[in-house]
C-alpha cells in the first residue's frame, strides 16, 4: 500500500506520533464498535488528497467559484453512483456528517415546531432523533415509539397508535442500536394512514441494504439519510437520498430533491468537502462489486456466531438475537454495568461501547448494556472461528472482571490473533 508520511514526520512530529500510535492501536485491537469500519487504501488516498484545497459551494456545473471542472466530475460520479447503488431518484453527497444530513432532511419535509414520530434513544434511536439536548429535540416536536417490553422488537402497533394520536408530519424509521430487521413497508402504511412523510435514517445498515441483505427503504421512503462510514465502509461523512417529487407539495416552487439540495447548501453548510466526496464516490464503486456482497454476508454471519456463542455463555441478548451487524447485551445479567464491562474489555484490547438498553433503569453515563458489531473485524478477514474465540475472551473477562492479570494475558492473545489479519499492510511508520 502506497503511503509515505515523511513530510508529516518532519513538519509535525507530534501529529505524526498520533498517526503512528493510532495505526498501531487499530492493528492490535479487536474493534467491535458497531459503527466503525476500516476503509480501503483507495478511499484513504482520495480522502487524503489535494481536492481538499478546492472551494466549490454550489453543485456540479452550478458553482459559486471558478475552477471546478475536475471536482464537478468526482461529485457527479458520487451522485450517480449513490443513485445507482440504492436505486434512488435523487442523491445529495455533500452532508458532512449524519447529524447534518438529518437536519437538512428534517428541514426539507418540516418546519420548526412540526411534529415527528421517531424511535427513542434508549430503545435504539439516535441523539438526532429528537433527544432534548440535541438540535432535533429543540427545533421539532418529537414523539417517540420504542420496542415491546417482552420481545424487545419494534412495537409497530404502538407506532400506529402514536401516529393516529399525534398526526405527525413525518414518521422516522431507523436506529443506531437495534439488532433486528426494520419493516419499512409497515412504516409506509402507517405514514399513508396519517398522511405523513416517511423518512429513514439507515446509517447503521446502509451497507447491508446496498448488498440487498436487509429490506430496502428506497421504494417506500420520501427521504433517506445515512452516514457513509459504518457498514457502507466509506469515508466519514453522509449522504441524503430522496424522491424527486414532494408528495404533499406537488405544485410547489421546489420539488423534494430541490428542497434537499437547498437545505444542505445554502441552507446549512458552506463549502463541500470535495476530497471526502471523491472518497465517497470510490466507496460507492466498491459497494457495487460482488466482493462487497460477500463481505456483508460475512458481517451478518459473524454477528450471528458471536451472538450465539455469547448466548451459550449465559449473556442476555436484547431481543434474543441479531439479524444485522450488531448485538446489544444486557450486561447486568452478569452483575455488571456497561461501563465496567467496556473498561475491562478495553484493558484486553477488545473495544466495545457501553449502551442504553430498552427500559434501562440506569443512566447513559453508566448504562446497563454494551453494544458489539462485526463490520470492522470482518473487514480484516475474520470469520466464524475468530468470533467464537472473541466470545470466549469476552466471557472470561466479564466472569472475572477485576482480574487485571487475566486481561493482560488476553491482551497478548488478542495481539497474536490480530497479527494474522493485517490492517494497511505495508504502511510502516517509524
Ligand atoms: N455514533 C454513532 C454510533 O455509534 O452509532 C451514531 O452516530
Image: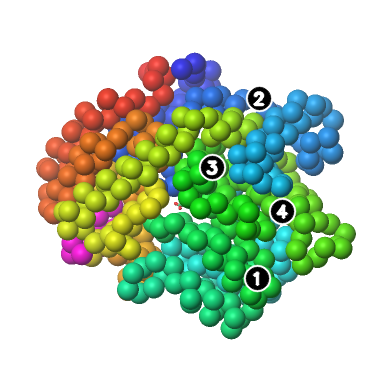
Q: CA distance from mark 1 to mark 3?
A: 25 Å
* Mark toward the start of the polypeptide (2 vs 4): 2
The residue mark sitting in front, 2 or 3, is 3
**Is residue 256 shown to the viewer in this render?**
yes
**Is residue 138 shown to the viewer in this render?**
no
Q: CA distance from mark 1 to mark 4?
A: 16 Å
* Place of residue 154 in the rendered image (x, y in percent of width and height, measured from the top left): 44, 68
- Decide: is 214 above or below 294: below
Res 123 label: none
- Decide: is 196 above or below 246: below
Look at the image and name its color scheme: rainbow
Question: How would you rate the neighbour count of disc 2 (Cα within 10 Å): few for under 14, some for 14-19, many for 20 or more?
Answer: few
* Mark toward the start of the polypeptide (2 vs 3): 2
Q: How many marks?
A: 4
Q: CA distance from mark 3 to mark 4?
A: 17 Å
Check residue 41 for magenta coloring: no
Query: Of 123 and 50, which appears nearest the observer?
Result: 123
Residue at (58, 35) in percent of width and height: 284
Residue at (69, 73) in percent of width and height: 195
Residue designated by label 1? 192
* Place of residue 285 in the rendered image (x, y in percent of width and height, measured from the top left): 59, 31
Mainly helix, strand or loop, the magenta region?
Answer: helix
* Place of residue 20 in the rendered image (x, y in percent of width and height, measured from the top left): 40, 27
Which SS class for mark 4? loop
* Mark toward the start of the polypeptide (1 vs 3): 1
Residue designated by label 3? 210
Amino acid at each position: 500500500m502506497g503511503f509515505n508520511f515523511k513530510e508529516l514526520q518532519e513538519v509535525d512530529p507530534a501529529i505524526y506520533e498520533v498517526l503512528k500510535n493510532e495505526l498501531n492501536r487499530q492493528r492490535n485491537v479487536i474493534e467491535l464498535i458497531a459503527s466503525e469500519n476500516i476503509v480501503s487504501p483507495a478511499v484513504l488516498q482520495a480522502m487524503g488528497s489535494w481536492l481538499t484545497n478546492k472551494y466549490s459551494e454550489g453543485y456540479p456545473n452550478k458553482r459559486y467559484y471558478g475552477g471546478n471542472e475536475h471536482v464537478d466530475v468526482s461529485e457527479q460520479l458520487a451522485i450517480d453512483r449513490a443513485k445507482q447503488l440504492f436505486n434512488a431518484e435523487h442523491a445529495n453527497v455533500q452532508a458532512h456528517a449524519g447529524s447534518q444530513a438529518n437536519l437538512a432532511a428534517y428541514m426539507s419535509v418540516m418546519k420548526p415546531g412540526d411534529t415527528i414520530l421517531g424511535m427513542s434513544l434508549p430503545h435504539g434511536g439516535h441523539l438526532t432523533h429528537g433527544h432534548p439536548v440535541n438540535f432535533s429535540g429543540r427545533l421539532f416536536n418529537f414523539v417517540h415509539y420504542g420496542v415491546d417490553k417482552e420481545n424487545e422488537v419494534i412495537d409497530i402497533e404502538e407506532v400506529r397508535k402514536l401516529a393516529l394520536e399525534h398526526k405527525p408530519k413525518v414518521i422516522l424509521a431507523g436506529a443506531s442500536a437495534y439488532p433486528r430487521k426494520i419493516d419499512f413497508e409497515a412504516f409506509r402504511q402507517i405514514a399513508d394512514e396519517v398522511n405523513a412523510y416517511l423518512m429513514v435514517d439507515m446509517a447503521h445498515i446502509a451497507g447491508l441494504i446496498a448488498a440487498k441483505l436487509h429490506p430496502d427503504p428506497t421504494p417506500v421512503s420520501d427521504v433517506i439519510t445515512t452516514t457513509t462510514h459504518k457498514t457502507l465502509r466509506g469515508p466519514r461523512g453522509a449522504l441524503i437520498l430522496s424522491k424527486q417529487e414532494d408528495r404533499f407539495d406537488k405544485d410547489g416552487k421546489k420539488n423534494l430533491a430541490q428542497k434537499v439540495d437547498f437545505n444542505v447548501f445554502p441552507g446549512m453548510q458552506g463549502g463541500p468537502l470535495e476530497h471526502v466526496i471523491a472518497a465517497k464516490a470510490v466507496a460507492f464503486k466498491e459497494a457495487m462489486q460482488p466482493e462487497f456482497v460477500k463481505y456483508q454476508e460475512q458481517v451478518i454471519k459473524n454477528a450471528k456466531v458471536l451472538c450465539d456463542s455469547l448466548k451459550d455463555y449465559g449473556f442476555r441478548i436484547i431481543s434474543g438475537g441479531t439479524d444485522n451487524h450488531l448485538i446489544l447485551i444486557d450486561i447486568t445479567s452478569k452483575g455488571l454495568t456497561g461501563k465496567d464491562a467496556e473498561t475491562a474489555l478495553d484493558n484486553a484490547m477488545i473495544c466495545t461501547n457501553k449502551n442504553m438498553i430498552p427500559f434501562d433503569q440506569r443512566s447513559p453515563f453508566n448504562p446497563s448494556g454494551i453494544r458489539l458489531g462485526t463490520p470492522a473485524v470482518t473487514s480484516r478477514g475474520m470469520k466464524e472461528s475468530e468470533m467464537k474465540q472473541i466470545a470466549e475472551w469476552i466471557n472470561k473477562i466479564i466472569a472475572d472482571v477485576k482480574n487485571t492479570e487475566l486481561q493482560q494475558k488476553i491482551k497478548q492473545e488478542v495481539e497474536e490473533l490480530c497479527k494474522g489479519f493485517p490492517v494497511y499492510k505495508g504502511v510502516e511508520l517509524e
